[in-house]
Amino acid sequence: MKIKDILKEKTPHISFEVFPPKTDAGFASVLSATDQIGALKPSYMSVTYGAGGGTSKNTVNIASHIKDDLGLTSLAHLTCVSSTKEHVARVIDELKKNNIENVLALRGDIPKESEFPLPNHYRYAYELVEEIKSKGDFCIGAACYPEGHMEAEHKKDDIYNLKKKVDCGVDFLTTQMFFDNTIFYNFLYRIREIGITVPVVPGIMPVTKGNQMKRISEMSGTVLPQRFRDVLDRFGEDPKAMQQAGIAYATDQIIDLFANGINHVHVYSMNNPAVATAIMHNLSDIVKNG
Ligand code: FAD
């Protein structure tokens, strides 16, 4: 099923994300986590994409498994900045061959110590959107950043670039994680104001380990509200307490989003079935998946 059709549902829905193993050795354990998360019947499951190595193959394999063996809608991420245009074209062909109809078109992070853009590589995600669109009847998602993308000097430019990307054929957007919902509501207002009308799925990350946060902040530049810092300060050193508090914080954010009229939330479940299960348990009378 195309995700743009799932997003027409007017009741609360949850989707989850998994990431493929870096090497084939980790494949079985990722598959097992995928199956356990899939058993929760999310409205779809996304599979991230890492540049190079065997990861691109594993993204397609896991997305096919979700669709064919678990009977769920899958969303395959695809990045373009570290691969040649020919390689990207081959992956799109693979997706098509496997009947994976939903693709999240991403630029990817610029590889360190490389000139940008590399010859014969795409420079921005909008170019990948155009390429996927030209290759078939895909439902195309893209990323957006309520706090602005790390490289963008001004939020205004980032939103302008986002509009350009969406106009190339994006069907829906998924946000970078955020820990303060008011940032998301403000962002939504600003993008609607400049004419971006596609559905926007907020991405929520349950932070269950104190030491996760430093990396997350460096990667995404996200603002940590005081309420969230207090949770980290109090429970960050106690793994069980942090897991419970992180799940509660994420649940609270999700309920607030639903209460404010959002119908679909994507949870960055990070191959962790226990976290995904706890979130679904907390929302069991709210979420209407399936
Ligand atoms: P773009 O949309 O190309 O934007 C990148 C930067 O370029 C922004 O600052 C933007 O303002 C600017 N820009 C865009 N278009 C133009 C233009 N026409 N002119 C000038 N400037 C422009 N990474 C992975 O490696 N694998 C994944 O699976 C993955 N999944 C993700 C899922 C989500 C929901 C999100 C939010 C991010 C994900 N990422 C993933 C990270 C992502 O690849 C990085 O954040 C990357 O730095 C930007 O990707 P993008 O697709 O948003 O790029």
Image (spheres, rainbow, N blue to C red):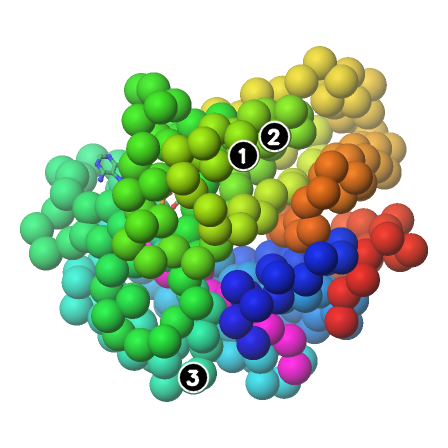
Residue wearing tag 1: 188
Residue under the image location 67 percent in, 18 percent down: 225
Q: Is residue 272 shown above or below 156?
A: below
Query: Closer to the N terminus: mark 3 or mark 1?
Result: 3
- Residue in the image at 71% along x and 18% along y: 229
Q: Main secondary structure of the magenta part?
A: strand
> In the rendered image, which residue does mark 3 sit on?
98
Mark 1 burial class by Cα count in 10 Å: few <14, some 14-19, many 20+: some
Whether label 1 touches label 2, CB < 8 Å: yes
The residue drawn where x is 58% and y is 48% is 201
Residue sitting nearer the eye, 147 or 16: 147
Give the alpha-carbon distance from disc 3 to disc 2, as whole Å.
Answer: 37 Å
Which quadrant does the C terminus fall into?
A: bottom right
Q: Position of residue 67 (x, y in %)?
A: 58, 79
Give, as a single range, the part of the protein colored magenta: 71-80
Residue 72 drawn in magenta: yes
